[in-house]
Image (spheres, rainbow, N blue to C red):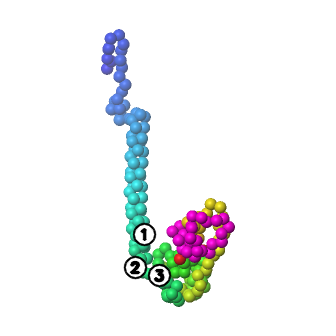
Amino acid sequence: MIANWGEKKYIPNKTSAQEGGKMSETTISRMLGAGIILVTGVMLFNYYRTAKTAEREKTSSTTTEATQETTEESPTLADLPASYEVKSGDSLWKIAEKVYGSGYNWTDIYAANKTVISNPNRLLVGTKLTLPKVETKIISHSVVRGETLWSVAQSYCGSGFAWEALAKTNNISEPTKLEIGTQLSIACK
């Protein structure tokens, strides 16, 4: 079939049906490109859906842990010696901070419980610990340039909000006027 348009003769290309069902390279490339885009879209959708689910679970479990902590009071220094059951997320350091006000007392807890703790870095949830009656370990710190009570509390106590306890322990009436070289006794509770 030859079409005559004016002086020029036009011979159309064979269609895929005329070639016996073969597809052109352009058609195959377009189909592969569309497939890649579709697979990428599905993967992104699943990723973001999973990330949101994980974030919700993280939030809800954090809320649960916070609720459990508020309902089950940790023993105070006056209650010692006392028994304590290990909860999810606990470490000897965290337990010592809650009870003694200093994470450095973790060694005392470990010494009193060597028979039930094989590795002080790994506590099993539900393990019953004995919290001994010992003095709170107070660490000394020399203030350097640029430090504030907040930054010192953040470093030693794990929270800047413990700055008030540091100010009280060290009889600091003007926490904004912390002088370089001042020796601070670190007690986080």
Query: Could you tell me the amino acid type at mark 2?
Result: Thr
Q: Is residue 187 magenta?
A: no
Residue extent of the magenta highlight: 157-185
Q: Residue at 39% x, 63% y: name it.
A: 56
Instruction: Judge whether 50 appears above or below 83 on screen.
Output: above
Dot in front, 3 or 1: 3
Of 46 and 89, nearer the camera is 89
Q: Which residue is mark 1?
A: 62
In depth, the one of 65 and 98 nearer the eye is 98
Viewport quadrant of the N terminus: top left
Q: State which quadrant residue 180 falls in.
A: bottom right
The local crowd at label 1, few if under 14, some if 14 to 19, many if 20 or more residues have their Cα within 10 Å, is few
Amino acid type, mark 3: Ser
Name the front one of labels 1 and 2.
2
Residue 166: x and y in percent read 57, 72
Looking at the image, how many numbered discs can be counted on the residues? Answer: 3
In the displayed orientation, state which residue is furthest to the bottom.
81
Q: CA distance from mark 1 to mark 2?
A: 14 Å
Check disc 2: other Cα within 10 Å, few if <14, some if 14-19, many if 20+.
few
The one of 154 and 56 positioned closer to us in this rendering: 154
Rounded to the nearest angstrom, the CA distance separating label 3 from label 1 is: 18 Å
List the residue tagged with mark 2: 71
* For residue 97, above or below residue 43: below
Residue denoted by label 3: 74
Which element is circle 3 on?
A: loop
Amino acid type for the residue under numbered disc 1: Thr
Q: Residue at x 57, y 64 (%)?
A: 176
Q: Quadrant of residue 134?
A: bottom right
Q: Are marks 1 and 2 in contact (CB under 8 Å)?
A: no
Q: Residues within 10 Å of mark 3 (few under 14, many from 20)?
A: some
